[in-house]
Amino acid sequence: MKYIFGPVKSRRFGLSLGIDLSPEEKSCNFDCLYCELKKAKPVSKIKNEPDVEIIIEQIKEYIKNFGYPDVITVTANGEPTLYSDLEKLINNLNEIKGKSKTLILSNGSTINDKKKQEILKKFDMVKISLDAADQKTFKKVNRILDGISVEDIIQGLMQFRKIFSGELIIEILLVRNVNDSLKNIKNLSKVIKEIKPDRIDIGTIDRPPAYNVYPLTDEELIQISTLFEGCNVNVVTREKDSIYENISLSEDEIIQTFKRRPYTYEDIKSVFDKKTLDRIEDLIKNGKLKLRKLKKTVFISSA
Ligand code: SF4
């Protein structure tokens, strides 16, 4: 089983090689309305956790073949901080990462845990989601496992900011008529100003969501961003990127990569080489990948 996927091109982070700590099935303590993965009951553990040694071997092999990516991103088909060997993983990654930076994408559910804070401190960049500032909206948008409190997450973020000298990014994802009220946004702005992250990413649904929910427009996002005055705000809109790399993937690697998230034609053309693009077309024809539409954008995803 391959635990690494991509690379994925990101405007903010560059070429990012992903590590999936839950490749077999979604293992998350949230079940967000906007999740790019299929809806699933929230759980508190990752099922069939991979071995750190195997992940590190796969990263080394990638670096040997393609060189250092800009970023090595620790993520999961779910929540990566639920992985029980996270400390060993980041210690090992820090030994082999060379000029790559390490990044973890978390839903923030464990940030109030002092032991987790000590582990997350070892990453170069930590990106945490915060979609609501009150428990009612939090439950509605993130459909959490019982017992998780948004107040704990906010307190945890404030403590973590004090001990973390790397780049802390808070991501807000807004869903129409769910967490886009002026009240929620003003509350978020207030707490985030206290947390003092290095950057705030404000975005909306960009890929086919797990539930029947709708995005905001780019204009609305830009308008909302003005409520975070004095902060370093990045409004995440879908922009065209220039060609970045010419990565080649086998059929199996393509299937593993598309399992994690759907891609647009624009995405794949900017990252993969011609042979990989031909393989993707063949996989679509053979029904191993499928096309899905969100508004006017066509996404390619696993079947
Ligand atoms: S969006 Fe992230 S945090 Fe939310 S359910 Fe999906 S994997 Fe979990």
Image (spheres, rainbow, N blue to C red):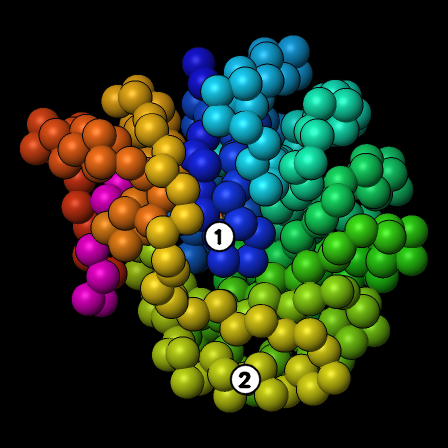
Picture quarter containing residue 162?
A: bottom right
Ligand 1 within 8 Å of disc 2? The answer is: no
Q: Residues within 10 Å of mark 1 (few under 14, many from 20)?
A: few
* Residue 206 % position (x, y): 37, 61
Q: Is residue 146 left or right of residue 90?
A: left
Counting residues from the start of the chain, the first of labels 2 and 1 encountered is: 1
Q: Position of residue 22 (x, y in %)?
A: 52, 27
Q: As rendered, which of 184 and 225 lies closer to the eye?
A: 225
Q: Percent position (x, y) of residue 26?
A: 46, 33
Residue 300 part of the magenta segment: yes
On the picture, is 73 further left or further right than 279? right
**Residue toward you, 188 or 239:** 239
Q: Which residue is mark 1?
A: 10
Q: Residue at x 33, y 29 (%)?
A: 248
Which residue corresponds to the image point at 69% horizontal and 86% vertical from the top-left? Answer: 229
Distance from Cα at disc 2 to Cα at disc 1: 23 Å
Does residue 77 sit above or below 249 in this rendering?
below
Q: Looking at numbered disc 2 in the image, what kind of residue is underneath it?
A: Ile
In the rendered image of this protein, does residue 227 appear above or below residue 289? below
Identify the image quadrant of residue 45: top right
Q: Which contiguous range is marked in magenta? A: 295-301
Residue tagged by mark 2? 224
Q: Compared to 55, does 280 lie above or below?
A: below
Q: Amino acid at mark 1?
A: Ser
